[in-house]
Amino acid sequence: MAEQHIIKVFQEEFFPHMEALKTFAYHLTYNENDAEDLVQETYLKALKFINSYVEGTNSKAWLFKILKNAYINEYRKKIKTPTILDFNDPLAVQETDMIGGTVEINWDDLAMSLGDEVTLALNSLSYEFKEIILLCDIEGFSYEEIADILDVPIGTVRSRLFRARNELKEKLTKYALYLGYQDKRGFKKNE
Amino acid sequence: MYIDGQKKVELQDRISLYLDHQMTSDEESEFTKNVSENPEIKKWVETEKKFKTLLVNGILRPSVSDELIKKIHDNVQVYQTSSPEKN
């Protein structure tokens, strides 16, 4: 890429994704400072490999792929093991609390009662499940883009996303029951 | 309407494809027609949509510090001025 285009490309195509990259990095590292270091590293690598980027193509996916690789190859080892957030134990909701193993949750109602619990529940998922939910549900990447970012087939994206969402729903459902959520069938925890 | 286990999994997969905008326009038309004819499926789609909204609105999005913005801008400037092509 011609040298005079570099700043233009950064300003017009790369910088607008800084906040999204920070959110992704934050949920991978659990730490604000590590997240900022990872974002900075991502932009440094983008600068280093700028010649492999084609102007006007999918800059967001390109940057997310760099960030994901930087995290796996370098940061995952450096960053201290995150505190394991056991989202199940404190909630102490038994499976038998859920009639037939399923509870219909009105996510609108639950949203009113939730603060950081969505973030905590997300962060309690495995790395693979967390990243796929962040890429699809939070950042809105297509399955094809996610497959490219993660270097996995589209079928893997679909099945992983399916399992990740179900696990997240299960965790939030348990939390809803812990809050004393009552579904439309008149069933409530501790009844 | 009773939906058995396997069909439930298939339907959940279709709903995901629909809400993630991964269907072709023909598939989407067929699916929305199917949804409009089945109140139970329609309710399920609405529930899944609300779950996605809960995630999008509930997730913590820390802001980017001014310091980071400055560092990144400086890095690009330094690269420009120290680039071998320019010298």
Image (tube, rainbow, N blue to C red):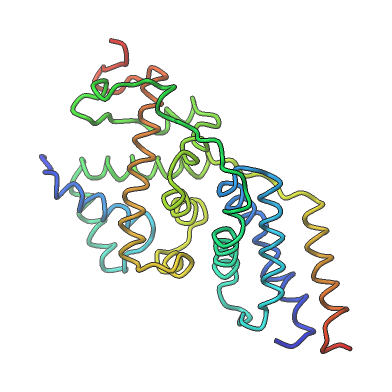
In the rendered view, tell whether residue A150 sits above or below residue A83: below
Question: Horizontal placement of B2 versus B11: left or right?
Answer: left
The residue shown at (30%, 23%) is A183
Q: Is residue A61 above or below residue A23?
A: below
> Which residue sits at x=40%, y=64%?
A143
Q: Is residue A52 above or below residue B37?
A: below
Left or right of residue A17: residue A184: left
**Residue shown at 46% from the left, 68% from the top:** A145
Most foreground residue, A179 or A31:
A31
Residue A149 point in image, percent of width and height = 49, 67
Instruction: Please identify the quadrant where the C terminus of chain B is shown.
Output: bottom right
Q: Is residue B3 left or right of residue B23?
A: left
Q: In x, y percent, where is residue A78?
A: 63, 52
Q: Residue furthest top?
A: A191
| Quarter assignment of residue B49 | top left
Q: Position of residue B61 (x, y in %)?
A: 62, 44
Q: Is residue A71 left or right of residue A118?
A: right
Task: Note whether A111 is above or below B77 in the view shown.
Answer: above
Q: Nearer the viewer, residue B20 or A27?
A: A27
Instruction: Tell me the residue at 14%/44% (across/down).
Output: B5
Q: In this figure, what is the number of numbered marks?
A: 0
Where is residue A107 shown, x and y percent of the image? 39, 33
Q: From the image, which quarter does the N terminus of chain B lie in? A: top left
